[in-house]
Image (spheres, helix red, strand yellow):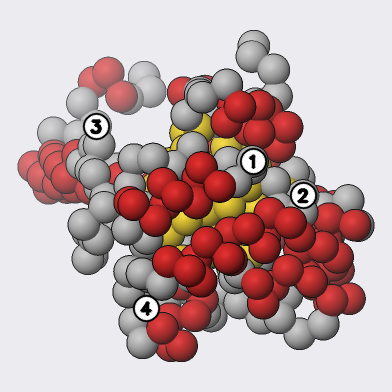
Amino acid sequence: MQSQVTTSTLIKMKQQGKKIAALTAYDFPFARMLDQAGIDTVLVGDSLGMVVQGKENTLPVTMDEMLYHTAMVSRGCARALVVGDMPFMSYQGSLDEAVKNAGRFLKEAGAAAVKLEGGADVCPVITALVKSGIPVQAHIGLTPQSVHQMGGFKVQRDEERLIKDAKDVEAAGAFSVVLEGIPSAISEKITHALKIPTIGIGAGPHCDGQILVLHDMLGINDRFLPKFVKKYADLAAAAGKGVADYIAEVQQGSFPSDEYEYK
Ligand code: KIV
């Protein structure tokens, strides 16, 4: 078996020019499948609010829900680095509360790191977590927890602010940074300006790695898909056909046939 991926592995991959492959996962069977396929890092994203719970955005997701899903994913990953996503209002209140909540991802749910959204504004939180021994992945650009402040899920184009946010989160101690919804030319500049790896989603090809939401790229989520999502499979169609065949066979009485019967 290949050795366990750590935060240092990801930094080394950037230094060696090796691209990092990341995906989200929310439960044991998918986490195990991604791990066995050779994924480098699995994010238990609060996107689960939308693609698993069917909500309009990520804001209602709770700490308990995140811990429940992160524990399942951790059990499925032998090699990949598991990152737990800190939900809205779990790190914005006070530094003490942020450290306590982030610590639960490592202590109770088996994650090796946490992710949180924001640039310069969240640097004191990043520093406090890192000082407590909790590795932090930052997330800048289109930050879904700020959907109301941004006036929707919009591509972020303020180059000066994005570059400053990226440098600030690196200086605060983040081991990597997710760049979401950023024009390729800006992501390229950020990637060259940082020593820590950039993981892009809707941020073009120049990032050190890429991440997609699993249910989007496997075609499980049949709701709106943004321009940057490539569908690598159509699991909803395959599963729908399986279920329709089962219903038809039950209705016709052809399932169970002899081979599925106890004699
Ligand atoms: O919640 C999530 O899945 C994320 C990724 C889209 C980066 O934050």
The mark nearer the N terminus, 1 or 4, is 4
Q: Secondary structure at mark 3?
A: loop
Residue at 82% over, 62% down: 127
Q: Percent x, y for residue 222? A: 22, 59
Q: Percent x, y for residue 102? A: 78, 62
The mark nearer the N terminus, 2 or 4, is 4
Residue indicated by mark 3: 256
Image mark for residue 76: none
Disc 1 or disc 2, which is closer to the eye? 1
The mark nearer the N terminus, 4 or 3, is 4
In the rendered view, tell whether residue 46 sits above or below residue 5: below
Give the Cα distance between marks 2 and 4.
Answer: 29 Å
Instruction: Looking at the picture, tell me which residue is in the foreground, 254 or 67.
Output: 67
Do residues under tags 2 and 3 come within 8 Å of each other at their CB atoms?
Answer: no
Residue indicated by mark 2: 135
Residue at 17% over, 45% down: 237
Give the Cα distance between marks 3 and 1.
Answer: 59 Å
Give the Cα distance between marks 2 and 3.
Answer: 52 Å
Q: Percent x, y for residue 87? A: 62, 71
Label 1, ligand 1: CB separation under 8 Å: no
Q: Percent x, y for residue 201? A: 39, 52
In the image, is 246 to the left or to the right of 120? left
**Disc 1 residue type?**
Lys
Asked if residue 240 can be seen in this view, the reply is yes
Residue at 77% over, 49% down: 135
Residue indicated by mark 1: 195
Residue indicated by mark 4: 56
Residue at 59% over, 66% down: 165
Label 2 neighbour load within 10 Å: few <14, some 14-19, many 20+: many
**Disc 4 residue type?**
Glu
Give the Cα distance between marks 1 and 2.
Answer: 16 Å
Q: Secondary structure at mark 1?
A: loop
